[in-house]
Image (tube, grey):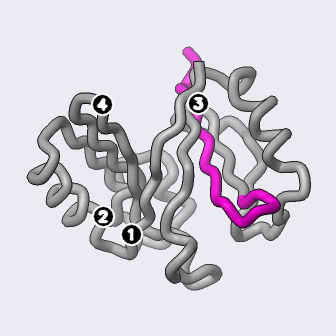
Amino acid sequence: MLHCTPFLLFDGNCAEAMTFYQKCLGGELTLTKLGDTPMKDQFPTEKHGRIINAQLKSGAIDFSATDWMASPQLEPKPGNTFSLFVVGTSLADLKPVFEKLAEGADRDKRTFMELRSVPFGTYGQLTDKFGVSWIFRGEKQE
């Protein structure tokens, strides 16, 4: 089953922002640094302290965030600092939705990543033909 939540992008202050939101909204906050993941070798060491994924769950509130990782190729600016986060259990759940949203999508390699297996599960991202950013994640299959 798929579900969709907001996904916020910060520029180095994700942990601070999400901790603030937790103080305001309560709930459970999970913060994962890039340096604590198998993906760390794909990024320069100066980014290893950044948050690769944060999630705040409080009752019916559930949203995620990250620190911006695309610099200097793509810089954060108003309008590109949020996405819709589609979470599913498998590639089979996510693929039909991804393919439909990818019709007419911007295929710029900085903003488009084909849905694929990564160390933590399934991942893909795109900006649709209306300029809306989508991020897809599937659970790691054992």
Task: Please give the label number shown on residue 138.
Answer: 3
In terms of secondary structure, where does tag 1 sit? strand
In terms of secondary structure, where does tag 2 sit? helix
Q: CA distance from mark 3 to mark 4?
A: 21 Å
Image quadrant holding the N terminus, namely top right
The location of residue 12, given as percent across then percent down, is: 33, 73
Residue 133 falls left or right of residue 54: right
The location of residue 117, given as percent across then percent down, is: 68, 36
Q: Nearer the viewer, mark 4 or mark 2?
A: 4
Query: Residue 87 lies in magenta, yes or no?
Result: no
Residue 106 falls left or right of residue 8: right
Pointer 3 or 2: first along the chain = 2
- Give the residues in magenta: 127-142
Q: Nearer the viewer, mark 3 or mark 4?
A: 4
Residue under numbered circle 2: 14
Question: 10 Å neighbourhood of mark 3: few (<14), some, or many (≥20)?
Answer: many
